[in-house]
Structure formats: C-alpha cells, structure tokens
Amino acid sequence: MGLLNTPTAIVVSFCLLGVMLYKRVKLGITLNATALALAFLSLEWHQIPSVIYSTTVDLLTIAVVLATFAIMLLSQLYEETGYIERLSTNLSKIVNNPKIVLGLLPAIIGFLPVAGGALMSAPIVDTEAEKLKLKPEKKAYVNIWFRHTIFPVYPVSQLLIATAALTGAPLSIIILRQIPVVIVMIIVGCFFSFWKVPKFQNREKQEADANLNSSLKGFLVAFFPILTTIIVVALFSVIDIGLPEQNLYVLIATLLGLAVLIGISKAGIHTIAKPFKNWGVYDVTMAAYGAFLLRNTMKLAGIESIFQELVTSGSLDIAYIITIVPTILGFLTGSPLTSISISASIIPSNIVSLPQTAALVYMSAYLGYVITPTHLCFTFTTDYFKAPLEKVYKYVIPSFLITFAAALAIYFRA
C-alpha cells in the first residue's frame, strides 16, 4: 500500500499536473513528474522501479516514442526547409478562402496518427488565421478541433481498430454510426471559429488558370512527404508484414516521409541538423514517454478495480459506464485507448458488442481525450499560439457538449 489510497493519490497528482500546466512547465517534465508523484503516493516502493522499467522496455512505448521523435523532426524540417510555408501559400491560392483552409489543413495533417502532430498544422493555421485577424485562442481552437474531426471515421486509426477488437463490434458499422457525429463536429467547429468573422478580401488580382496549375503543382510537391507517410501507414495497416508492434509502421512511414522531404527540398547537412538542436523535439518525445508512464502507473495503482467494485456493488449504473466513465477516464488519463480498454472490460459483453454501444463508448472516451489539457495536441497548440487555457475552453467546452449530445442522440435512436 502506498502513502495514500488510490483515489486520493490520483487527486493530489492531478492537482500537481494542473499547477505545472498553469505555470507552463515543459510538458515532458510535467507528465513524467505527475507519473512519478502518483507512483510514490499510491504504489509500494518496490513497484516504482518496476513500472519505470516495464514502461521503458515495452515495445509499444518504444515504437510510439521513436515515432513521436521522427514526426517532430519531420515537422521541424518542414519549417527549416520552408516547405510548410509553401504548403500554406499554395493551398490558400488554390482554395482562395482562409476559412476553408483553416478547416481543411488540420484535418489533412490529422491523418498523421502521432502524438503532438497538431504542431505540424499550427504554422499554417497561424498564417491563414492572421488574414482573418483571429485571436490566439481562436487560432488554438481551430487547430485542435479540426485536427480531430477525421479520426472517428479514419478506417486505419489504431484507436478505432482497437475499439472494434476490444468490444467485438464490426469496425465498418462503428464508422458508419460516427459519420453523423463527425458532421456535427465540423459544423460546430465552423460556427465557433468563423461566426461573425468578416470575409477575407483578397486584393491581389490573380490569373486564375495559369496560377491554379502552378499552385496545385506546388501544393502537391510540398504535401508529398506527408502524403507518403499517410499512404505507407495505410498500406502497412492493410498488409501485415509481420512487425511485432504495429506502431513501428508509423515510425517507418515517418522516416520515409523524412527521406522524401530531404530529397525534394535538397536540404543540406546544416539544415538537416537544425531540428536536432531544437529542445522542443526532445520535450515532445519526453512527453510521449511520460504519457505511457502515467497510464501504466494508474493501471498498477488499481484504477480499474475501483470501477469494477462500483459496478458490482450497484453503486454505478451501466448508462454511466457507457458515457460518463469513458469521458472522465479519457480526460484524466489523456489516453482514449486506456479509457476504452477499462470501460470495455467492465461493461457486459452482450452490451458492449452492440455497434451503438461501442460507438458511444468510443466517442465518449475520444471527446474526453480531445478536451483534456494533458492531451499533447491541446497543450502544444495553446503553447504555440500563447493562448490562455481558460480562453480556449470558452470555445472547446460548448463544442464538446454539442458533439456529445449528438453522439447520445444517435445512440438512443438505435
């Protein structure tokens, strides 16, 4: 038994987490410190080195941490080579509407299923949002919200695949049931992002046909490294080549994307070396490790058994387990997979295997994860735009409530 019981230890640890986030301590330090604090407060002394060791040598952790490091290098190299600016400039010329670009680009880059990937779209969002004179909190909201509209219907999403496996519900039916929710997410995002925002007046006169072809070619060239990564991840997800951990696919795909970017940009050694000198790359990588350490510590502390006891004793209704429990767990852990794993294990199999139940559990956990400050994309984005959390939540909370209501309405119509 640790110094405190598990519920008290979790409360104290997450209070520490909140303070460190408020003080803008580096996220890598914050998550690891929170995990260690929870370990010291809730675990036996001999369990602490054990959870650190098991997290460090776990193949899933290694794969995700290395993939995170690679995607951060890709993101930084996009900036160093100027290709992120080319991507933004050419797309804005093709579409010629900053509002569409702001909604589209984070979603496109959202195809990269790596923690902290929102940083790749942040510079583009910043450039386009300036044309509409959006405030920092709205820039952050746009980047966070639109990035996460794609995952509930992305068929090679690891979270969706895991949800289907854990619940026993067909993947295709889960996706179909979540299409209306995604539509609501997009509508809500457009409303809170662009309501009463004046239309952008482009004073530049363009020769449409000639410039369109040039811009389209420029966009495709600039987007090709990301597209390469997406295609390789999709191919690996469909064709099993026998790797022991599927997240290694993401690492391989990202390295190929890096190679393509270096090749087409003809980046020199000096340019390639610059991202390795950026502390942000290592902070995000540390944060990815800290997220796993925190998740494993919470599991070892016995959070799952607490909920199982509540269900067994009748203190917790099944409806709450399908909705409130996944949402809270997604919010607290910053891991929708952990939330879904725990929720699926305490819901009777004949109920959780129903597509409508599986979809609602997924959306509850996912939305809880999207809005938590421990969510890497959330914290990195607010830090990038220097936007206070409370001002960003002014848009995030009502968006969450409306989308969650839509998920409930679809569930009860079944």
Image (spheres, helix red, strand yellow):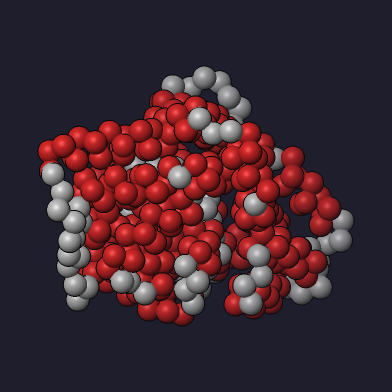
Write down the quadrant of residue 414 in the picture: bottom left
Q: How many marks?
A: 0
**Outermost residue to the top:** 241
* Residue 335 spot, x, y in % from top left: 53, 56
Residue at point 49% right, 58% down? 377
Question: At 25% across and 58% down in the image, what residue appears?
Answer: 98
Where residue 399 appears, x then y in whole percent? 32, 70
Quadrant of image for the N terminus:
bottom right
**Left or right of residue 170: residue 161:** right
Q: Is residue 40 visible?
A: yes
> What is the x, y in percent for residue 40?
80, 66
Write the residue at 60% across / 37% down: 272
Give 341 or 131, whichever is nearer the viewer. 131
Asked where in the image residue 412 lies, by quadrant, the reply is bottom left
Front residue of this view, candidates 340 and 269: 269
Q: Position of residue 26 (x, y in %)?
A: 66, 65
Above/below status of 91 relative to 249 = below
Q: In this rendering, would 187 be left or right of 360? A: left
Is residue 75 at all visible to an observer of this figure?
Answer: no
Q: Is residue 358 left or right of residue 311?
A: left
Q: Is residue 352 above or below residue 383?
A: above
With 172 as the anchor, is 367 left or right in this view? right
Front in this rendered view, residue 87 or 140: 87
Residue located 50% across and 30% down the image? 266
